[in-house]
Image (cartoon, rainbow, N blue to C red):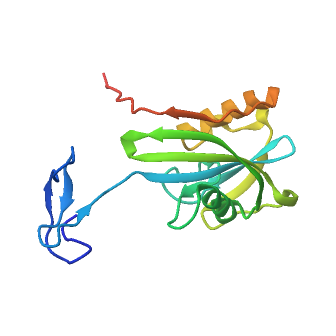
Amino acid sequence: MKFCSNCGAEVERRIPEGEDRERDVCPACHTIHYVNPKIICGCIPTVGDKVLLCKRAIEPRYGKWTLPAGFMENRETTEEGAAREMWEEAEARAVDMSLYRIFDVPHISQVYVFYRCEVLDGEFGAGSESLESKLYAEDEIPWDELAFPVVIEMLREFFEDRKTQDFPIRNSTIRYQHRRSG
């Protein structure tokens, strides 16, 4: 950040009094500009025993399959955000939503919140951010073509939980694993 969004003055990078980390601080109006993690909301939508996946029409991971999800907007709940993203990406309405999974991904400053849900009347399509949407049974999932590690982990847990019909809310952390070459 170069300039204060409150008054337009040039900001300084320093540790404000009473805090423990550097922030962008405006020396003119004394506004502290906080940069916080992004929240991603999504769904694990089902129709019968199948899961609805979307093929991405945008980067990152263009052409890979994923669950409908995206950034939470201001003034919406995580549940509203997940339902909105499902409509935007899969042209499907979420019903019977139930919190299922939370992932903390600190190396990219993101938090993922996912809900289990059903697809209203089994109707879906492909929104502007999807090349296509498709229902997959567990043995049909294109595991090698999934876009994100959180989607892989979540789908594996979902199919295990479905065997017992016990869907506990889980919270875990995905840590960056730096790979050395050679």
Using residue 64 as the reference point, say whether residue 51 is left or right of it. Answer: right
**112 and 133: which is toward the camera:** 112
Tell me the residue at 80%/38% (across/down).
137
Tell me the residue at 21%/43% (across/down).
20
Using residue 169 as the reference point, say whether residue 110 is left or right of it. Answer: left
Quarter in which the N terminus is drawn: bottom left
Rendered position, 180 above or below 67: above
The outermost residue toward the front is 18
Tell me the residue at 11%/67% (across/down).
27
Rendered position, 135 above or below 165: below
**131 and 170: which is toward the camera:** 170
Place of residue 120 in the rendered image (x, y in percent of width and height, measured from the top left):
83, 59
- Quadrant of residue 105 in the image? top left
Place of residue 71 in the rendered image (x, y in percent of width and height, measured from the top left):
52, 58
Quarter in which the C terminus is drawn: top left
Total marks placed: 0
The outermost residue toward the top is 182
The outermost residue toward the bottom is 7
Using residue 160 as the reference point, say whether residue 56 is left or right of it. Answer: left
Place of residue 134 in the rendered image (x, y in percent of width and height, measured from the top left):
76, 51
Place of residue 129 in the rendered image (x, y in percent of width and height, measured from the top left):
60, 63
Tell me the residue at 67%/31% (across/down).
156
Rendered position, 134 above or below 102: below
